[in-house]
Image (cartoon, rainbow, N blue to C red):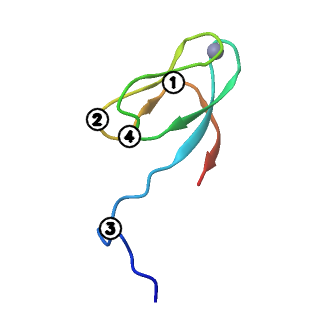
Amino acid sequence: MPKLREAIPKPRSNFIKVRCPDCGHENVVFDRASRNVSCSVCGAVIAEATGGKVLLRGEVVERLG
Ligand SMILES: [Zn+2]
């Protein structure tokens, strides 16, 4: 049996693909980002940091992992 380096259970975090409401670019956002996330193309804020799960400003395209 392999040794686990961490046995502490953690809430699962996810990456979410969010479409920018301004330009339509699909950005991958970490759902527990500690800072606001901006669109990589136009710079619009697409997810606001809240201290927990981010507040999404754009449309969720897909949830990853
Ligand atoms: Zn954009």
The image shows residue 58 at horizontal and vertical percentages of 57, 25
Give the CA distance from mark 1 to mark 3. Answer: 30 Å
Residue 20: image quadrant is top right
Which residue is tagged 1?
A: 57
**Residue closest to the eye, 42 or 21:** 42
| Kind of residue sitting beneath label 1 | Arg
Which residue is tagged 3?
A: 9
Q: Are marks 2 and 4 in contact (CB under 8 Å)?
A: no
The label nearer to you, 2 versus 3, is 3
Give the CA distance from mark 2 to mark 4. Answer: 7 Å
Q: Earlier in the sequence, mark 2 or mark 1?
A: 2
Give the CA distance from mark 1 to mark 4. Answer: 13 Å
**Residue closest to the eye, 8 or 13:** 8
Q: Which label belongs to residue 51? A: 2
The label nearer to you, 3 versus 4, is 3
- The local secondary structure at tag 4 comes to loop
- The local secondary structure at tag 2 comes to loop
Q: Are marks 2 and 1 in contact (CB under 8 Å)?
A: no
The label nearer to you, 1 versus 4, is 4
| Kind of residue sitting beneath label 4 | Lys
